[in-house]
Amino acid sequence: MKRKTVLALLATMALTTGATATTFAANYSDVKTGTPVSTYVTDVTDKGIMEGETDTEFGVAEGTTRSDLVQALYKLNINLPVTGSHEFTDIAGREDAAAIEWADDVGLFDTLNSNFFTDNKFEPDKDLTREEAAQILYTFAQKVDKMDVSKGVGSLDGYTDSAEATTYADALKWAFGNKIFTGDDLNTDEVENAVRATATISKAETAQALSVYMSLRGNTKEEVQQVVNTVAPKREVTTSNTSKENTATNTVTGNQDAAAPETPDQEEVTTPETPDTGDETVTEPENPDQGNQGGEVTEPENPDGEVTEPTNPENPDGGETTKPENPDQGETTNPENPDGGDVTEPTDPENPDGGETTDPEEPTEPENPDQGETTDPSEPTDPENPDGGETTDPEEPEQHTHTWGDPYYVIDQEAKYEKVEVIDQEEKWDWVTNIITPAWDEEITEIHTVCFTCGLDFDAEGMSNEELLQHVKQHMLNGESDGSYGDKEVVVDTIHHEAVTEDVWTKVQDKISHFEDKLISPEKGHWEHTCADCNTTENCQKPEA
């Protein structure tokens, strides 16, 4: 695969500018003035789209080659040519190479059958069939002109050979519907009414196709001629070895003595959190037990510096204490209560903690040392209720009979379904006989001498000249005619031709179906009933119907 360069563009300009000379249809000996062919040929030659075989002959009956059509479409393209990679091995050095490569680039051959090309050869001089030309133009309309090819689409059903137009049927329907192709041969006066899909397309038919297509596209002579005469501008290519990375490097490394950004390691940092172990005075309220660490500290026992004399041995922390004499209370300290709290006199030997007690003359009930409410000690404690709470008669337990309501169903899991297709009618295919050419009768005719008065066929009757003259003389005597007679074409026989058919595998019945819900997992649940009195709910059996 050869990569094309700027030379392809130069070849393109040579091809397009070489087509500026025009030869009018009036100069061609094989183009009759005043005919549709003359109109089409004048149109395409006047616009420089097609050229004649010679200066005096257009070649209306000659076949259109692959190169002919590609070059014509190349001149219709209003974009600059494109270049790319191509695999054709037989176009190097040809005048039409640029046009062929352009057509390949824009995809004009993408919709052709895979066997259109063989062995990577384009075969420029090979004739095109009508259906191949229609398909290439159909693709050109879509890919190059972005035309809506759904407009004007016709039908091939009315043509005698429509059954043969199957390979590129869509393109042919579009071409026939838009009058790009017609069913009659432009080079004859015969009415053929045929598609002739596989017949070679003539240059007259190609001129018709391109002329009608240009009218559909809306091209004017000036638009096309402007493209043909356009000279592609030269492309100036510059090469630079300087990359973005080199540019960035040159910008940064211009001056090595420039001030570089300071880094954190180069800055002078003062650490305010670092303690000094010199002679500074430091107060450490969080840990008074550490003593003097080299600086002056306050007394940990009394940060305010004031103490109460004397120090109480019972209060070694040095806090303010009450003197043992308790002058503020006027009472002496109870040796049983060295903390100096208020106590009740006399101290109960059974209450050494100094708490409030009851009258010592009133005995404490051993059954209830917590002084709570007690029962009569003469009454025995209930062994079934040692805490003394209120109890019911054990011989009379509370009885409850449930009053069950009607059973009801409780769903534990919903049923699951899925959509399934149900076939109501299967699709059917069968062999169907299609009629290619209907049966017809061929009449065999001869030229016979007949009487113009009564229609008598003298040759068929085997009459002599004397008998012929006597016959017409009798008509004259009878005043029936002037006795004229002469030659006339008469049917002497009929040959019957059977219909031409083919069997085609055809779908004769469509599939009909519908969708239904198919149960995947059934619903799950259980039955319950509820007591009307206490609202107790229990499972139960399914009620009988």
Image (tube, rainbow, N blue to C red):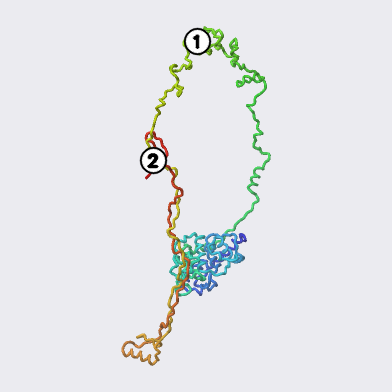
The x, y position of residue 286, in whole percent, is 60, 21
Question: Along the line of sight, which residue is nearer the eye, 346 or 439?
Answer: 346
Q: Quadrant of residue 452?
A: bottom left
Which residue matches tag 2? Answer: 407
**Rendering quarter of residue 120:** bottom right
| Element class at badge 2 | loop
x 42%, y 39%: residue: 539
- Farthest-out residue, right: 256
Mark 2 neighbour density, 10 Å: few (under 14) some (14–19) many (20 or more): some
Q: What's the amino acid at mark 2? A: Pro
Would you say residue 173 is visible in this rendering?
Answer: no
Regarding mark 1 in the picture, which secondary structure is present there?
loop
Residue 342: image x %, image y %? 51, 11
Most extreme residue toward the left is 478
The C terminus lies in quadrant: top left
Residue 451 coordinates in the image, percent (x, y) = 37, 86
Q: Amino acid at mark 1?
A: Thr
Q: Residue 344's mark?
A: 1
Asked whether 403 or 88 is in front, the reply is: 403
- Residue 475's disc is none
The answer to which of 461 and 322 lies nearer the viewer is 322
Q: Is 117 displayed left or right of 371 in the figure?
A: right
